[in-house]
Structures are given as C-alpha cells and as structure tokens.
Amino acid sequence: MADYEFHRSSPARFHPLTLILLFLGVALSLSANIYQFVRGERTARDLALTQNKLQAQITRLSDATSGAFSVTEKRFVDMKKAEDATSSRLNKALSQSKRSSQVAGRLEDRNQKLERRNRELVAQLTELKQEINAKLQKAEISAQSTNSRLDAASAKLDQLARQTEKNRGELKPTAAAIPPPVPAVPAPRRPIVLSRDVGQPAHFEFDLLKTKVPTRVAGMQVAVRSADPKTNRCTLDLYDGDRIVETVDRTVNQPVQLYLHGSQSPREIVVREIRKDEVLGYISVPKPAGIQTAASAGRKDTPVSGPDPH
C-alpha cells in the first residue's frame, strides 16, 4: 500500500521537473534544429555564393581561354602568312639568284669573247703596223733609189752638157776652115714619106705600191687595191678626176682601155710585172690629132718640098 502510494505520488512530484527537462530538451532540440537550419541556410548561401563565384571564375576563365585561343589562332594565322610571304620571298630570291647567275655567266662569256676579239684586233693592228712599216721602208728605199737614179741622170746630163759645150767649142774653128758650099743644081722634087714611128702613142711607165691614195700618171690617176704575185693578178682603181670610173682585175700583159672625159681616143693600161704589194707597167696615151693627120698625110705620100738628099 505504501509502495502504491509512493508510486502514485511520485509522478505528481516530479512532473514539473520532467516538463522542464522535456521543455529544455525540446528547446535544445529546437535550438539545435534552428542552429542546424541557420547553419544549413548559411552553408547553402555560402555554397551558392561560392558556386556563383566559381561559375563567374569559370566564365571569366572560359572567356579568357576563348580570347587567348582567338589571339593564339590569329597569331598562328599571321605567322602562317608571314611564313608564306617569307617562303615566297625566298623562292623569288632564289629565282633572282639563278637568273643573276645565268646573267653573270652570259656576261662572263661575253667578256671572254670581247677579250678574244680585242686580242685579235691587237694582233691585226700589230700586223698592219708591221706591214705599213715594211711598206714605208720599201717606199723609202724606192724613193732613195729613185733619187739616186735622178742624181745619176742629172750627173749624166751635166756631163753631156759639158761635152756638148766642148764639142761646140771644137766645131767653131772647123766650121771656119770649111770652104763655102758650091751652089747645087736643083733636082726634081720627089715625095718624102714620114717614118712609121711618127705619131705612135706615147708610153708612160709607172711603178705603184698598194695604197688607197691614187697616183697621177699620164693625166689620169691609178690606185692599186691588191697585188698577188702568186696568182699573177692585181686589182686597179682607175680615176677620172677625183672619182673612180672603173675597178678592173687583170693579169700581166692584159690591156685595159679607158675613155677619159673629153677624150675621143682611149688610154691603154698594161701591167708588165706584179710583185708583193707593187705593180709595174705603162699607160699608152694616144697621139694628138695634128700628129695623126701628118702621119696620115705621110701614108698618102703627100709631096713635101725639100732638097734631094742624093
């Protein structure tokens, strides 16, 4: 009975404490729940904020990466263009270098040809100089020989003149000692025929060297263009005044006839000898008209008055 009472009275005694404890427990549980809720909200807010920040960073990183990729791609394209341009310039430079090498080769060949040509011209000039010197020496020797012949001829003329004067002086006393001639009985006239040599064409000798300057011979001018003793042929330029009227190629003793201006009869040119760069011959000049008439008259046996030689 006592135990029963005790049990019946015990809940009534500890009931407020239990309520308080229960209340405290509920309050603590509620506080814990609120704390957990607040903490969860805060954590969720922080998580959302962190997520937003992370998303913003990801976006910025994506934008930065995209921009960097675009810049990198642009740089790659620019580098590719620069590389293509450099390659093109390099190819062009190589082509120009090849062309320059070819041009240099052609210029070198041209220079070599010009050098060979210059050497040939120098050799030709040297040979021509030697030939001209030889001709000048030969002409000088010929001139000296001519002067010697002229001096000898002049000496002979002087000697003949002195001999003539001497003979004239010796003939004067002889002529004085001769008695006067006895008059002769005139004989009948007889025709006298002129000699055939009267009126023959005159021959003018020439000795000409090979030169472009003509030499005057017998009223005309002659220039020797070539003279070849091996083939025995020569080429002559024949002038009438200051102009060439004919260029002839002849051998020895092959006559050439040339009519000069104002002349009715031709001149005849004959080459007698051909030497190296030298031609010898003569020019035959026709006789004047008066002599020709006299010769014709002589051929007709025209009587001419004169004493009988017999």
Image (tube, rainbow, N blue to C red):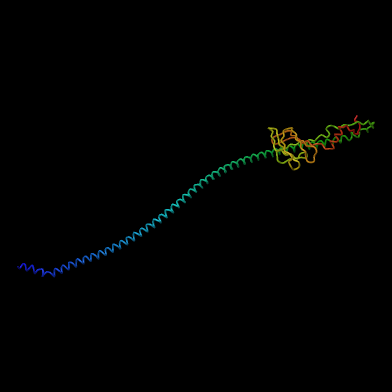
Nearest the viewer among 207 and 109 is 109
182 or 193, which is in the foreground? 193
Q: Residue furthest top?
A: 310
132, 288: nearer the viewer? 288
Q: Quadrant of the N terminus?
A: bottom left
Q: Residue 97 at what x, y percent from top left? A: 51, 47
Q: Quadrant of residue 305?
A: top right
Q: Is residue 117 above or below residue 300?
A: below
Q: Is 22 placed above or below 280 here?
A: below
Residue 177 % position (x, y) = 91, 33
The front one of 120 and 247 is: 247
Residue 193 location, quadrant = top right
Where is residue 176 drawn, in percent x and y?
91, 35
Question: How many numbered marks have been drawn onto this rendered protein structure?
Answer: 0
Left-right relation of 143 to 89: right
**In the displayed structure, does residue 94 sit left or right of residue 189?**
left
Q: Quadrant of the C terminus?
A: top right
Q: Residue furthest left?
A: 1
The picture places residue 295, in percent across and down from the top left corner, at 85, 34
